[in-house]
Amino acid sequence: MQDETGAVETRIMDAIAAATDLSALEDVRVAALGKKGEVSALLKTLGGMDADDRQRLGPVFNQLKIRVTEAVQSRRATLEAEDMSRRLASETLDMTLPVDTDPQFEGRIHPVSQTMEELSAIFASMGFDVAEGPDIESGFYNFTALNIPEAHPARQMHDTFYLTAEEDGEPLLLRTHTSPVQVRTMQAGDPPFRFIAPGRTYRCDSDQTHTPMFHQIEGLVVDEATHMGHLKHTLEAFLTAFFEVDNVAIRFRPSYFPFTEPSMEVDMRCHRDGDKLVVGSGDDWMEIGGSGMVNPHVLTHAGIDVEKYQGFAFGMGIDRLAMLKYGMPDLRAFFGADLRWLKHYGFLPIDVPGLAGGLSNKSLAAK
Ligand code: DAH
């Protein structure tokens, strides 16, 4: 009988080893240990035996049951582990792929909005407030208060959009520059002043580098001892941070603006490397804006004591700054509302500009 048991055990153990998946193993288990299984049948025969046989074969059958049970368990553990490895190998997720089905990755921040945020972050770090003024202006704030009198040719130079509505007998207009915010902000507060005013501006002009609506940023600092050295440092510090370079060189070229005296155009040292603009080195100069010491007439219009206070101002085109920094060639595309353009040049909402994290640390997922 014990020999016979040995043959049964060998057959069952072979079947266990030959089971290549969990369901085949379960079949083997049921055939051996199930209610009608082979081992169970052997155990059942003990009931019909005499006491001696039962004493001798009882432990033999029970040991067989234990060994078969252990063999099934160990084979199951092996098959489960193999199964897991197979699933781990086949059910991989590529975590480097962009998750682009989420709506938050669909929308884009317009490069002009992003640039305005960058400008605000940089100037805020230098202690500048952000001021705003209306797009629809009076002739007084857009011209007169800025020392551009009625008959002055600069009024014609600006190609102004006039509205039919009037204020004080004068037609209202779409502001042609952000400079009127200088006067409005100074009137509303007390010196010293240190603010920027980014915003929309309008001129009746349209070609590859001009659109009827465009964006400017104005800067104004008024204090008791403000001088041109402060202006130069401010512009250099701004350009270094904005173009994310170690240093920039700028030069002032004498110019004329009615609201500043002296007036200078600001050029920045640069060169071209193929299509790419490299800022800070080279033999070229690129004009990036106008500036000067605030004309005392402007301060007087704003109610500032010119015996005590003086200041500097500057104005730059935001669209142009964005074009230079992000290599966007055509200004008109900015306002074409073409989603393909926006997808390509736009920013994700999570790309919040800040000086600490790298100003234009564009997320890889945006592309
Ligand atoms: N308002 C000028 C323009 O639109 C730009 C400008 C030049 C602004 C010199 C300034 C400045 O504040 O000082 O062309």
Image (tube, rainbow, N blue to C red):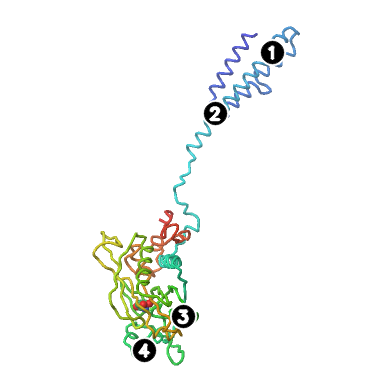
Seen at 35% across and 86% down, the residue is 155
Count neighbours of disc 2 (C-alpha within 10 A) and say few if under 14, some if 14 to 19, many if 20 or more: some
**Which amino acid, by three-letter code, is at mark 4?**
Pro
- Of labels 3 and 4, the one closer to you: 3
Seen at 53% across and 32% down, the residue is 83
The residues tagged by marks 2 and 1 sit, at their Cα atoms, a distance apart of 30 Å
Residue for badge 1: 59
State yes or no: Cβ of the residue under disc 4 lies below 8 Å from any atom of ligand 1. Answer: no
- N-terminal of the pair, mark 3 or mark 2, is 2
The residues tagged by marks 3 and 4 sit, at their Cα atoms, a distance apart of 20 Å
Residue for badge 4: 149
Residue for badge 2: 79
Question: Residue 353's x, y, as percent?
Answer: 44, 61
The residues tagged by marks 3 and 2 sit, at their Cα atoms, a distance apart of 80 Å
Secondary-structure class at tag 4: loop
Seen at 67% across and 21% down, the residue is 36
- Of labels 4 and 2, the one closer to you: 4
**Which amino acid, by three-letter code, is at mark 3?**
Met
The residues tagged by marks 3 and 1 sit, at their Cα atoms, a distance apart of 104 Å
Q: What quarter of the picture does the N terminus occupy?
A: top right
Residue for badge 3: 186
Which residue is at the front of the view, 274 or 4?
274
For the question of whether residue 360 can be seen, the reply is: yes
- Of labels 4 and 1, the one closer to you: 4
- N-terminal of the pair, mark 3 or mark 1, is 1
- N-terminal of the pair, mark 3 or mark 4, is 4
**Which amino acid, by three-letter code, is at mark 2?**
Leu
Question: Residue 96's x, y, as percent?
Answer: 44, 47
State yes or no: Cβ of the residue under disc 3 lies below 8 Å from any atom of ligand 1. Answer: no
